Amino acid sequence: GDTHSLIKAMLPLPFALLLSLVALRYADAFTATSPNVLSRSGSAATSLLTDDEICAYPPPPPNCPFTPQEWEQRCALAVSYRIACMEDWHMNIFNHITLKVVGSENEVDGPHFLLNEYGMGFDEITASSLLKVTLDGTQITDTVTGDERPMGRVFKPGYVLHSALHSAREDVHAIWHCHQVDSTAICQTTTGLLPLSQEATFALAKGVAYHPYEGSVNSLDEQERFVKSIGESNKVLLLEDHGPLVVGERIEEAFSTMWFLTRACQYQVRATSSVGGDLSRINIPNSHIRKEMDRRAEKFDEAPAASKVFEDEGKNGQEEVVTKHDTETLMFGCAR
């Protein structure tokens, strides 16, 4: 009722401003009731939140048919779809972000993974609307009510590609695929991803592989070739003439990798366009600089070193203690 009255009162305002004010209204309501809002500065709660607090989600609703762990995964995945929409990594009703359900590998038909329903926009995805499927695309129905009807539509190319990687790599829990314009354009070139920026270095450090285009991903025969192309440890797979795909041990890693990758591709497209595609006019680092870039990339999220006093065999000394920020969680928390 309050919101309805507020909207009626603001109808004469420009539409963009109206949306902004309504968004702020909802933000105020959220911050007033949630202890998990990120505090930057200047508010009553100015203490830094832990990484776990940054990633906290609302508790499951009453009579929730999902385990607490699966509910949290569903929240994280729903947020991921909204982030993808915000970053313009969505394409109408197509593309998928999937997450392996914790503990489902112990099920007879496991492991299971979560994905979006075909026909829904990324900005419409909720924790409850996500579908749970087996590696062969069979939907896991509602075990609480006993309803055995399919919960929604599964897009075959989505499960063909994602199930292949979820099945083959135990370290893969999250898969993020999109057709973002610039990164897809890079997939259409023979140069591939070039080490032209810090962002490119971070993406390349994850291990980048390529897979030749065979057409729409609806043939089960191609699954084995996907697995062979990505290899045992690479976390970026550029699908030629198709689009980028990244995998991660958690959704935060998949997001941050995709963020660095798409940003690097945006730079590369603009840089090559500005010189008419003449790579001789591009500052491509030599092998010596590449090694130094890689070395620094390994340490880019280190905190300033601290000294620790120790005693060894009666002798006092100091050693340097280096800690790392959880950049992936911080980036995901910021986007969220």
Image (spheres, grey):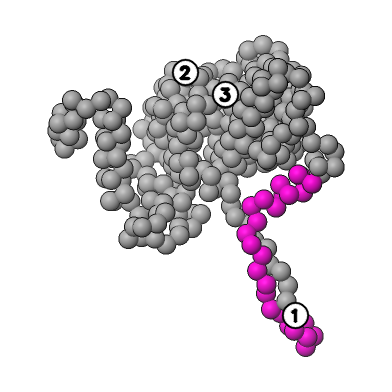
Which residue in the protein does label 2 denote?
92
- Residue 220, position in %: x, y? 67, 17
Are there few (<14), some (14-19), or many (20+) residues within 10 Å of tag 3?
many
Which residue in the protein does label 3 denote?
180
Q: Amino acid at mark 3?
A: Gln
- CA distance separating discs 1 and 2: 61 Å
Q: Marks 3 and 2: CB-CB under 8 Å?
A: no
Q: Residue furthest bottom?
A: 314
Q: Residue at x 42, y 21 (%)?
A: 120
The residue range painted magenta reads 292-317
Question: Which of the two discs, 3 and 2, sits closer to the camera?
Answer: 3
Q: Can residue 130 be seen by looking at this rendering?
A: no
Quick check: is 220 in the magenta stretch?
Answer: no
Q: Amino acid at mark 2?
A: Asn
Q: Amino acid at mark 1?
A: Gly
Quick check: is 296 in the magenta stretch?
Answer: yes
